[in-house]
Amino acid sequence: MFNKRVKVKDVLTSNETGREVTVMGWVRTFRNNQFIALNDGSTNNNLQVVVELGLLDDTTLKRITTGASLKVTGQVVASLGKGQKVEVKASALEILGDSDPEKFPLQPKKHSLEFLREIAHLRFRTNTFGSVFRIRHSLAFAIHKFFNDKGFVYLHTPIITSSDAEGAGEMFRVTTLPFDAPPKNEDGSINFKEDFFGKSTNLTVSGQLEGELGAMAFSEIYTFGPTFRAENSNTTRHLAEFWMVEPEMAFCDIEDNMNLAEEFINYLIQYVVDNNRDDIEFLDQRLAEEEKQKPQTERSELGLLEKLNFVLKNNFERITYTEAINILLDSPAYKKNKFKFDVKWGIDLQSEHERYLVEKHFKKPVIVTGYPKDIKSFYMRLNEDGKTVAAMDILAPGIGEIVGGSQREERLENLEQRMQEMQIPIEEMSYYLDTRRYGTVPHAGFGLGFERMVQFVTGMTNIRDVIPFARTPKNCEF
Ligand code: 4AD
Ligand code: MG
């Protein structure tokens, strides 16, 4: 019977002495043949289990090693030791699973994040990853709570699609055709009519287009699921498989869209600050240690918790793309030729430019609107100047782009014209245009990169460390 188990976190937070509990978990350390630090993943704080002399025979004692799993029954008593108020005095101890201390890769010492990535199946058992993934869970929960409380409908948009209307980048093809001898058309091209779906299909890069279809009936929807991009970007902010949150709102313009996105990000931060205090404090400490290793000039001005509180207290800066370009042209970095990529109106902002704006110039999150139409997707609403679109990107310190969104082009003629200019197959997308034919309304939405949000809240610098099992170019382990 395992169901009577009490979680370590509950034993430690209730602080109630005298009761008998059964706890289970994995051994972190075992000292003096007497003190076990037991962890079950409910908190980073280990439960001290005291094994009094004579309770166990020598063979059993030898099997209590780092990584082994235990079932312990005993009384909760006040602890004399430092660091915890209560501990469990074992009256019975059973070893559920042995762990060979010679072979167990996680030793009770500091391991590098790179090494831990190679043993991602075990890294959950470390304090750092315990905190990161409990916070990731909290953020996912808070996302649903935020939208549910506002009456949004959670719409499950498909994972397999037949369009790349987004133009977001390279896609992963989904096919059951044989590689060695795919059926061919007369002109030599592959005959996708014989493929599983009777057409060429791929993994989705975004749920937005289907989200718009839902918003045209429910008024407000959101989708939250995995998205896939086969871009060959080996950076600390790109994954080939990542999760995206995409709300889509009818009767909503770019201003409403920005307001919602800012409220949403603040809500998520506040939720974690309120509900994951221990984990945030642990990561705050961890980051502070890491910062100490860096040269003075590269250190962040604010600690993790300070940064989160700062964001909560201050409004995001809102500027236009044109203003952003002017700030960059005026910057000492530009004048001293420090940027690798050129700056002029019309360029796509590179990450060095985004970082300058956010980290050096404004020192807080920035919302940039009104990008040139030529560097953005076809569905974004054309502004009156005829040159820019009602796009908005949110840039966050240490991360760069965390949100991308826009007001959508709801005017059928404008949309068709943009699609023609950008060579988007209009017939295939007829279903999408129907929303503009039958009761079109001003609408807007955005996509928040979930892992980038987890990075921002946990302070983890590499995106591979905030998703359980990262998929990146040339890497698909586990
Ligand atoms: O800016 P993106 O490409 O926007 C869209 O896909 C729109 N359809 C969203 C919408 O309006 N509904 O992507 C949105 C966000 C980015 O701001 C970034 O945070 C994240 O998704 N993102 C990635 N995260 C991790 N790895 C990648 N390869 C990412 N590409 C984008
Ligand atoms: Mg973008």
Image: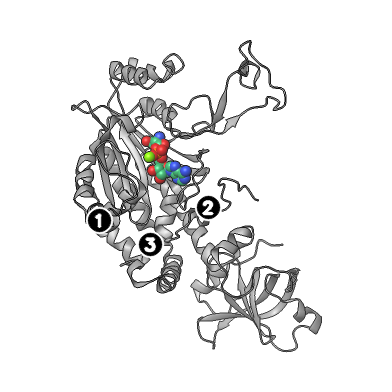
Question: Callout 3: few (<14), some (14-19), or many (20+) C-alpha neighbours within 10 Å?
Answer: few
As measured in the structure, the alpha-carbon distance from the residue carrying label 2 to the one carrying label 3 is: 22 Å
- Say whether residue 69 is left or right of residue 286: right
- Say whether residue 303 is left or right of residue 132: left
Q: Position of residue 19 (x, y in %)?
A: 59, 76
- The first of marks 3 and 1 along the sequence is 3
Specify the quadrant of the image occupied by residue 58. bottom right
- Say whether residue 32 is left or right of residue 337: right
SS of the residue at dot 3? helix
* Residue annotated with mark 2: 467
Residue 363 visible to an observer of this rendering:
no
The kind of residue on which mark 3 rests is Asp
Q: Position of residue 376 (x, y in %)?
A: 34, 32
Q: CB under 8 Å between callouts 3 and 1? A: no
Question: Callout 2: few (<14), some (14-19), or many (20+) C-alpha neighbours within 10 Å?
Answer: many
- The first of marks 2 and 1 along the sequence is 1
As measured in the structure, the alpha-carbon distance from the residue carrying label 2 to the one carrying label 1 is: 38 Å
Please name whichever residue, 79 or 351, is drawn nearer the observer in this view of the structure: 351
Question: Callout 1: few (<14), some (14-19), or many (20+) C-alpha neighbours within 10 Å?
Answer: few
Classify the position of ligand 2 by quadrant: top left, top right, bottom left or bottom right. top left
* Residue annotated with mark 1: 336
Please name whichever residue, 332 or 348, is drawn nearer the observer in this view of the structure: 332
The kind of residue on which mark 1 rests is Lys
Q: Which part of the image, by quadrant, shows the N terminus? A: bottom right
- Say whether residue 160 is left or right of residue 365: right
Measured along the vertical axis of the image, is residue 99 above or below residue 326?
below
Measured along the vertical axis of the image, is residue 246 above or below residue 359?
above
SS of the residue at dot 2? loop
* Residue annotated with mark 3: 274
